[in-house]
Image (cartoon, helix red, strand yellow):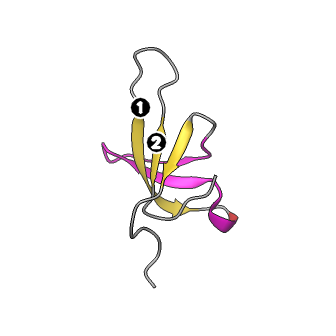
Amino acid sequence: MQAETGDRLLVHGRTVGQHDRVAEIVEVMGANGEPPYRVRFEDGHEAVMSPGPDSVVRHEPGSGPPV
């Protein structure tokens, strides 16, 4: 899994009735875009995550550091 700052992390619900969660990747802490990632969820809280197989990175157009 590789990501850049500004990408979205989609975390699928693990149990019936649990909703998917979306977070913005605000910092890539691993080498070459690999986890862990510092993410900010829609409600504003931040966390450091090493996403598992229930997660997907959505690359956003124009994401990444400024050139």
Q: Secondary structure at mark 2?
A: strand
Q: Is residue 41 above or below residue 59?
A: above
Q: Which residue is mark 2?
A: 10
Whole-percent x, y for residue 37 in the image: 56, 54
* Disc marking residue 44: none
Q: Foreground: 41 or 14? A: 14
Q: Which residue is mark 1?
A: 20
Within the magenta stretch, is there residue 23? no
Residue located 62% across and 63% down the image: 33
Q: Neighbour class for label 1 at 10 Å: few (<14), some, many (≥20)?
A: few
Residue located 32% across and 48% down the image: 44
Q: Residue furthest top?
A: 16
Q: Neighbour class for label 2 at 10 Å: few (<14), some, many (≥20)?
A: some
Amino acid on which the number 2 mark rests in the picture: Leu
- In the image: residue 33, left or right of residue 42: right
Distance from disc 1 to disc 2, alpha carbons, whole Å, reads 7 Å
- In the image: residue 35, left or right of residue 46: right
Q: Is residue 53 above or below residue 42?
A: above
- In the image: residue 25, left or right of residue 3: left
Q: Foreground: 54 or 43? A: 54
Residue located 62% across and 46% down the image: 50
Look at the numbered discs 1 and 2 and tell me whether their residues touch, using CB distance below 8 Å. yes
Residue stretch rendered in magenta on the structure = 32-51
Residue located 63% across and 38% down the image: 52
Whole-percent x, y for residue 23 in the image: 41, 47
Quarter of the image holding residue 55?
Answer: top right
